[in-house]
Image (spheres, helix red, strand yellow):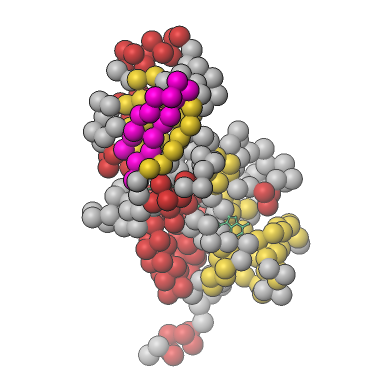
Amino acid sequence: MGGRVDVAVIGGGPAGLTAGVYLGRFLRSVVVLDAGSSRARYIPASHNCPGFPHGIAGEELLERLREQAEEFGATLVRARADGLEHVDGGFEVAASGKTWRAMKVILATGLADRLPDEPWAEEAIACGALRLCAVCDAFEARDGRIALMGPADSLAGHARFLRGYTGRLAAIPTDRDIDPAAADEMRALGVEAFSHGGTLGFVGRRCQWRAADGSISEFDTVYPYLGYEGRNALVADWGLEPGEEGELKVDRYQQTARPGLYAIGDVVSGLNQISVAVGQAAVAATHAHNSLPLVPRDRAHADASG
Ligand SMILES: Cc1cc2nc3c(=O)[nH]c(=O)nc-3n(C[C@H](O)[C@H](O)[C@H](O)COP(=O)(O)OP(=O)(O)OC[C@H]3O[C@@H](n4cnc5c(N)ncnc54)[C@H](O)[C@@H]3O)c2cc1C
């Protein structure tokens, strides 16, 4: 038995750890179960994270958040939750052969990016040759030679966003040729549109596109828009009707259709950002706290602290 807690948080990325900080400071018992694969670990340096004008690496941010959550009493457990059930008006969470009983559960399980299926993908992310989130870091890539790749239908929208950052932009369709109307739009935007077919390579610290005709183009940065999957497997059969990419639907308190079950961060959001994840964590943790029974503070605590 893992124990009884007021709240079990599943996922220890920025969202789950921030929920841990808030709940600890609300003097609630909280366990944060984490499988250890936060998307934030991929971030070489984030420059849009509030309060870090010179940037912060994702691993360091996670470490600081872990320290902060523990400082206020959250219990952090490295384990993958593999079962979640609704029992007796509360929840039972199973992980690594143990179970936790919790009155509320906050799902902060994030999402899984679909990366190019290449052995070098993580190395290319680490040096910024592959970037996964233009909102996060197109600023750093600005004025470089940038390619975006993804399904033909999706390219024009991404090109409009990225064209504001560079005059050297190319679009690579991964499923079929770009249709004539989209190709016209690309031309009008000054975006080079490739035909379908070719291979992406990684040489030194840059990506290379070898087109079907054998020609090679080098890019400082490639943004692959290959989609992602919300990590919602624990509640897959709960009838919560997630969106197309697995994102869970919540109310304004981050509560799902199942009372007492909250969802925060990338598993919910359309804008997958740390600031959004931590904001949602604050909202969910506060609502969960306010809907738990009051535990009046014993005078003995004041007497003990003088
Ligand atoms: C390359 C890259 C660069 C980025 N740069 C920025 C940036 O500069 N600024 C910015 O704001 N955002 C950036 N992001 C996005 C940011 O990383 C995410 O928005 C953020 O990490 C979301 O936090 P989260 O807690 O919701 O999910 P995550 O950080 O992904 O954490 C989810 C956690 O849940 C755990 N988990 C999943 N399932 C289970 C389970 N069953 N049991 C236990 N644990 C589980 C996972 O192992 C993981 O540790 C970037 C992302 C990438 C990939």
Q: Residue at x 49, y 64 (%)?
A: 20
Q: Position of residue 249 (x, y in %)?
A: 59, 40
Q: Is residue 287 visible?
A: no
- Horizontal and vertical percent position of residue 264: 52, 50
Above or below, 71 against 170 in this view is below
The residue at 44%/38% (across/down) is 201
Residue 24 horizontal/vertical position (percent): 48, 69
- Looking at the rendered image, the quarter that the N terminus falls into is bottom right
Q: Residue at x 43, y 24 (%)?
A: 214
- On screen, 155 above or below 275? above
Q: Nearer the viewer, residue 131 or 11?
A: 131
> Quick check: 45 left or right of 3?
left
Q: Is residue 126 visible?
A: yes
**Eyeballing the image, is 12 above or below 118?**
below
Q: Is residue 207 magenta?
A: yes
> Percent from the top left, x then y, of residue 38?
49, 56
Pick out the residue farthest to the right: 88
The span picked out in magenta is: 205-220
Give the main secondary structure, helix, strand or loop, of the magenta stretch: strand
Q: Residue at x 70, y 71 (%)?
A: 98
